[in-house]
Image: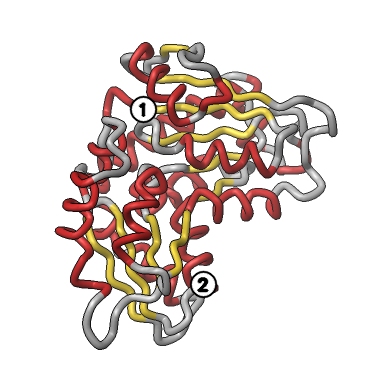
Amino acid sequence: MTSQQRHTVNTSFDAIPVTYPVGIFDSGVGGLTVAAAIRRAMPDERLLYLGDVARQPYGTKSPRTVTRYAVQAAEFLVEKGIKALVVACNTASAVALEAIAERFPGLPVLGVVEAGADGAARASARGRIVVAATEGTCRSEAYERAIARRRDGALVRCVPCPLFVALAEEGLTDGPIVDSVARHYLGSLFDGTEPGDCLVLGCTHFPLLAPALSRLAGPEVTLVDCAEATSSMLVRLLEGREAPKGSGGGLHLISTDAPERFARMAGKLFPALGAVPAVELADL
């Protein structure tokens, strides 16, 4: 165990240097939507992003396996030295957040599920909330529990949309193919006498499909972007512990496999990085 890891585990949040970066991890590039939102809200923060490309997708795996992968990803980032951890994967947030928090009691840990649930509870007009997510997230019922804690009487319907991840990873974010798949998964939930009035994009890949999903749901339906909700929650969490003004921030990318492909995809999703940004290859 490194000195940085001992520091993070055994001391309080206030003892962690404010100049340490914020750690972020996801199973792939989807979590870059969270990184981008954080970058916009907190431009002076340094961000350390890990994409566990070698073991994606997390959404189809068992809770036990996802928890093991998530804790390993957290351990890797803690060893680098971080002041807070954002679990930018809805599946890992749904099943592994408690295990990560127990492993690192001195480290603030924030998951996208709690942030998204908070945003949905606030945004829904009638408490008719649809969550588009992965199989693992829906199976965990984490959104249902998190929203129920914040909104009495809310009706939450979580719909697995596994092909959305593949579409986003392939860069197919709009057009007739996306429209067709979206109608297949979600079309019936925005018709009838009790249609949804709020759609939670319950996977960090899904904001990339937002134009198509917004058209499907209709103008009366509020879309909740977990990336933006997570960014807002992190701003509140780090109040008084922000990086010094003028630090310049930055984003360092790490992938567990195929760094060249990861770099190309990251460049498309995060143009400020350049067409093919530098990516560190790591083995968890």
**Which residue type carries mark 1?**
Asp
If the image is split into quadrants, where does the C terminus sit? Answer: top left
Residue 56 screen position, x and y as percent: 27, 32
User: Element under label 1?
Assistant: loop
How was the colour assigned to the protein in this rendering? secondary structure
Q: Residue furthest front?
A: 176
Q: Quick check: 49 above or below 153?
A: above
The image quadrant of residue 14 is: top right
Gap between marks 1 and 2 measured at Cα: 32 Å
Residue 92 seen in render: yes
Find disc 1 in the rendering and name its residue. Answer: 52
Q: Residue furthest right?
A: 245
Q: Residue at x 44, y 68 (%)?
A: 146
User: Element under label 2?
Assistant: helix
If the image is split into quadrants, where does the N terminus sit? Answer: top right
Packing grade of label 2 (10 A; few <14, some 14-19, many >=20) is some
Of 199 and 171, nearer the camera is 171
Tell me whether the residue at label 1 lies in contact with that at label 2, contact meaning CB atoms closer than 8 angstroms: no
Residue 76 screen position, x and y as percent: 48, 25
Q: Select label 1 or label 2 by which is in front.
A: 2
Residue 262 screen position, x and y as percent: 37, 20
**Which residue type carries mark 2?**
Ala
Of 184 and 29, nearer the camera is 184
Q: Residue at x 34, y 80 (%)?
A: 155
Q: Quick check: 28 above or below 241?
A: above
Q: Horizontally, is 34 left or right of 44 in the view?
A: left
Find disc 2 in the rendering and name its residue. Answer: 123
Q: Residue at x 32, y 66 (%)?
A: 217
Tally of numbered discs:
2
